[in-house]
Amino acid sequence: MKAIKDSVHGHVRLGEVAAELVDTPAFQRLRHIKQLSTVRLVYPSANHTRFEHSLGVYHLARSAIEGLGVDDDTAAHVRAAAMLHDVGHGPYGHQTEGIIRRATGRDHDDVRWLLTDADREVCQVLERNGLDPERVAALIDGEGALGPLVSGELDVDRMDYLVRDAHHTGVPYGTVDTGRLVTELRLIGGDGSGTAADLVLDEGNVATAESLLVARSLMNAVVYRHHVSRVAGAMLERACERYLDRTGTEVEAFRRMADHDLLVALRDRVPGLGERIERRDLYKRAVWAGIDEVPAGTVDAGRAEERAAEREIADAVGVDHDAVLVDIPSRPALKEAGSAVVVDGVPQRLEDASELVTGLRAAERRRWTLGVYCPAERVDAVAAAARDVLGLRATGRPSA
Amino acid sequence: MKAIKDSVHGHVRLGEVAAELVDTPAFQRLRHIKQLSTVRLVYPSANHTRFEHSLGVYHLARSAIEGLGVDDDTAAHVRAAAMLHDVGHGPYGHQTEGIIRRATGRDHDDVRWLLTDADREVCQVLERNGLDPERVAALIDGEGALGPLVSGELDVDRMDYLVRDAHHTGVPYGTVDTGRLVTELRLIGGDGSGTAADLVLDEGNVATAESLLVARSLMNAVVYRHHVSRVAGAMLERACERYLDRTGTEVEAFRRMADHDLLVALRDRVPGLGERIERRDLYKRAVWAGIDEVPAGTVDAGRAEERAAEREIADAVGVDHDAVLVDIPSRPALKEAGSAVVVDGVPQRLEDASELVTGLRAAERRRWTLGVYCPAERVDAVAAAARDVLGLRATGRPSA
Amino acid sequence: MKAIKDSVHGHVRLGEVAAELVDTPAFQRLRHIKQLSTVRLVYPSANHTRFEHSLGVYHLARSAIEGLGVDDDTAAHVRAAAMLHDVGHGPYGHQTEGIIRRATGRDHDDVRWLLTDADREVCQVLERNGLDPERVAALIDGEGALGPLVSGELDVDRMDYLVRDAHHTGVPYGTVDTGRLVTELRLIGGDGSGTAADLVLDEGNVATAESLLVARSLMNAVVYRHHVSRVAGAMLERACERYLDRTGTEVEAFRRMADHDLLVALRDRVPGLGERIERRDLYKRAVWAGIDEVPAGTVDAGRAEERAAEREIADAVGVDHDAVLVDIPSRPALKEAGSAVVVDGVPQRLEDASELVTGLRAAERRRWTLGVYCPAERVDAVAAAARDVLGLRATGRPSA
Amino acid sequence: MKAIKDSVHGHVRLGEVAAELVDTPAFQRLRHIKQLSTVRLVYPSANHTRFEHSLGVYHLARSAIEGLGVDDDTAAHVRAAAMLHDVGHGPYGHQTEGIIRRATGRDHDDVRWLLTDADREVCQVLERNGLDPERVAALIDGEGALGPLVSGELDVDRMDYLVRDAHHTGVPYGTVDTGRLVTELRLIGGDGSGTAADLVLDEGNVATAESLLVARSLMNAVVYRHHVSRVAGAMLERACERYLDRTGTEVEAFRRMADHDLLVALRDRVPGLGERIERRDLYKRAVWAGIDEVPAGTVDAGRAEERAAEREIADAVGVDHDAVLVDIPSRPALKEAGSAVVVDGVPQRLEDASELVTGLRAAERRRWTLGVYCPAERVDAVAAAARDVLGLRATGRPSA
């Protein structure tokens, strides 16, 4: 069995199918997609990639599946899904997801098209080993009883990335007891093929599940939503939109780019923003507003409304449209709250078993922030125009 | 400067006073007091002592004090207090605290008597170096503006023990960003002597403070209040009471024992319980009841009521009085909730700045559990008698 | 399967036999035997015990045995031997080994007597589970093809302790790639019962094996043979000899003591040395001499010659016999040098495959040091007398 | 003081000059130069960059300089040199060093040209803060008494990279006690300006220095010279040569590229090799020969002779010249052997104080290997031709 050294899990041992999948171009491409895209501009050690993360997810899935008592064929499909769950990502991962979804209607979790026709090599490996690409794709999409293990509230994806992101950023908040989590998962009901069953955490694991939520919440606060990373992310998204407009690149070709392709392409074709991103010469916050300052309609604005607001603000100040970026995150959510945990013999939703969830929900809401960014020398003018255009309420809380 | 290697902080460098204090018998004794007493019966790696913990607290205090802008004399007193904050502990630390407090009215934090007369050697070191033992004792007691740094809601004691206990038990939940905490503390107001000032966490540290609470809450759940450790702790406390009764040992002499003295003494003089503790041949849970099952009066019972109930249950079942142990923890609290954090320029209590605190409070309440323990073969009979004697309500929740 | 949290290996999962063995008094006693005895007087975090080490050795043995292709019955015996390999240790481990060996002719590796008659409970567990105590004892003694896995040059004992001792002392030198070592072991020849076969490291592992030697060599230099630990060890050994003389305690009863028993016993019955050890009020080095200063006959002196020299020096200076300790380590050796490693398809001894071994041998020789210790105020007088009595050559190298 | 989180050192605090240097384009470019270039094709977690490494080197230099007693001005120059020591690196670091040196006669350590005229921004920061760029450049070149701290046998560069590379690859061999090393350095002689003085390790640090050598030797064996990384490195070097030939790019412009620029450029302009590198579709080893198989003249061959041999082999087999790569490393060396360590009061070269050095030298020699690489399907033919052209002796040792 081939082993790959991993800085988080030690040795990751690859079964035969996994070893073949690693060698496909679609998987090798993940070496060139960083896990945390613009976060590395805040935490310079955070250069880890979706390649090693995918190996980690495979590793955890293999451990978890051992204790679930499913048949070999089902287990093999779950392992393949874990390996491949991120091959659908575009360059800079989540940062370009919105663009790709708006253009194609497809998410990175939707890899059906990819597995079933676009990328013959992955398909061939699967079929040669007696695996059904369609079934693998369905698992990646979270379908069936075991879909939630790959993509759900208690999935091995999250277990790996929280630990890995903490390890590489150097913050102590993402530490989750993965060793315990993977051995405490159970399938309740079902017939061994993983259908008509529920994935739950066994008795005595409320604190284990809570630690996952808490880790996510603290990582959100200090890493994933750090304002510097968000500013850079907004610049990147805008630069990508410009790039697609200017070059007429097909979204599908765009999606297949790797980080280095995109970085070079943006610098060459959208030099203003592209060079700034490469050199970390970033916009500053003109507005940084909590949810209570923002009208409900604005909180729920889509990208089209964001862009309209950007243009209106830019025109009001008299600057180029690319000089104003409006960044409205989606409403605060806490998906892990729906995890099932057995308490006193009965499976319950974590939010019903743990009062902590209510507190974490409120913390997420408090941390939700709308941002407007622009070059440093325009901060005051843009702030005034933006508060006006977006209808922000004054709350006494300073804007940045 | 002398350096001592520490498995948590790397090198701890000792100033001159600290190096002299280390060599006193009162400080060397801490080598023989384990930090987590009976927890090592659950987590066998948890053998660390109050000696290394005290060095760690000194190390953090030294870092924290550097950024507070206090005068050298004040800083020297704080460092000495950090070194000595645990010299008042009896054998098995918190486990014998109740006994000592009930007999003497003194807590382990009250080291005035110790520093000011009983232990001449510590006093002599302090005085020889121009330090006032009385002032050191006051700091250990949490008095003055800098007392809270040594013994308060945001103290270096807690920062060290959460990280150290997690490191040694091997659980990933106690990780706190001590490096950040110690550099973000500020004194607001005051004149440099550390009086009339408040210790607060600087702007931007709500998540940092929350991580401390969360770490404590999760460590409570899986480590500090693990039922095996509680059972062993209850056996130990009872054995100590018997030992004091039987031997007429002065409480003061008892308090000066080290762990090894106590272990040998109990095995020799209270062989039933003493040998069981040494061999980890523990009682089992007959009752394990949540706060909603327990009448309010019982929740607030003192040791005298506990012992009366134990006798009543034992008599009802017809066993020796030492065969039934009733263990009622104090009401759930969350002292860190009062930490002060600067938000938008204004110091606030953490519980006002963080909705998470409410959730953690509720979680602490849910985890509060009353236990009744006895030898395995008596579990059923003791359970029935205990529910009756203690007036427990049936809630449908199984008793263990 | 029962799991125990370990600070080094994460979770150690116990099979059924192991879970039963853990509960025997002989195994529980290991909670009270520290792994590094007097080293904790230098590295205060080094409080780990032979209990957790034994679990770690079991854990590594289980992994290693999986890849060796032996039958289930053989594997079960190896696992039991790994669990039990240290139950023969006296208090303070290696520190009392010499005393016990001189009195009984038995080493801590010789557990035949223990498994086969003295400790019925361990025997009963083994026999109840179909295991042969005699065969387990033989493995612990290093016999047969698989004996070397438990007690040999490439044994799992050493793999665990080097990593564990480094983790707990906080020095970075003991790190060994145990994950790789246990998966690269092979049995060459043999029939699956583990007889007539050789345990070797597979091709491509010269550097892996070298890292084990190097770790040992560096740990020797900075941890195991640190002069403070050696001084305390010499005081302890002398105190034990006095204790046995004075109390007439049977060596067998002595061997069954735990650390806390011995610490209390020495303080009570050999108060001079006993109290000094407890309070870390140690003797100082009067002589610290390299191998080139010491006559060959003295290098090879046994305990009897050491004691004769001690008395002669003490008489010359006019102090009590307990005030002079002569500490002559055994000749430098490097047992791991005989490990077998496959190079270019052929098993070779590591010392033939690695020129590093020669360098490490020379380094061990250079670091060999004879010590003479006494109370601080007598250092000069004792140094002069000792150099004379021991016939030390002047080399220009200072004595301490 | 600005702090940056680092996964190895925790928090790196930046002084004013350092904070300004970080923001220059020349320093930000280091975010895009990976520390270990092609090693990440073997150890997928090894994605760390020269940006974070440079911060780490600065951090260690700052600690080391504190204990050396030099004046503030000298210390400031050393800190700046530590920050900037790698800004002269081309894309893929050491992998393109040969090309740049052959074309320009300049090494990455020679940053005089860069600091003194090409990169005005770095110069301006230095001069604005009263620092002399010429003096900083001289330190980076290893000149003066403190040059060796930045670039020498005991430099902070090596201390950082050994620990960092081990952390990110996940191998346990690179661990060096940096905390101890930086506090044990001393300047012997000199006048505080750092001239006419020698940098040495203080008494009692032979094992500390040895651990640095040993770490390097083991890291060489399993990481830096792993054959997969060497194959990819040889492919990359050849692709770069082709790229320069084909595009006429100035070497200076080439040197200023970042990793992503080069990856895209090679794929576009040298598609055969460029695409293979991107997809990790690597050549295989046709020959892998130890130093005793290789004629002395061949061991000392320069790049010109290598290329001549490549062409001759390719012609003999009848393949394209890019299909054969000859990779002859420079002769084994062990530069750290010259480190100065104080032993018995006298500074000595480590190789005179430590017999280990001889062993490590021999190990380096044994590990020296010449490689010839080609596409998998040509391995046999190329092997035969290569052995003939290079005049390799048969030693019975298999070729791969």
Image: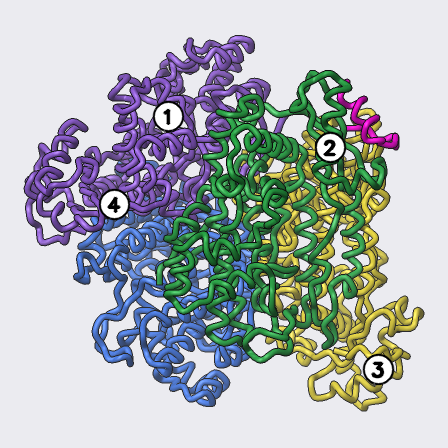
Chain colours: A green, B yellow, C blue, D purple
Query: Which residues fall within the magenta stretch?
Result: A381-400
Q: Which residue lies under the disc numbered 2?
A: A371
In the depicted structure, whether residue A109 falls above or below residue D387 = below
The structure residue drawn at horizontal position 10% and vertical position 37%, both measured from the top left corner, is D315
| Residue B100 falls left or right of residue B282 | right
Residue B386, which numbered label? 3
Which percent across, then down, holds residue A211?
A: 67, 57
Q: Are marks 2 and 3 on the same chain?
A: no
Tell me which label, 4 or 1, sits earlier in the chain.
1
Q: Secondary structure at mark 2?
A: strand
Chain under disc 3: B
Depth check, front residue: C142 or B350:
B350
Q: Secondary structure at mark 3?
A: helix
Residue A151, which numbered label? none
In the depicted structure, whether residue A93 falls above or below residue D338 = below
Q: Nearer the viewer, mark 2 or mark 3?
A: 2
Instruction: Judge whether residue B128 is colored magenta.
Output: no
Name the amino acid type tagged 4.
Answer: Tyr
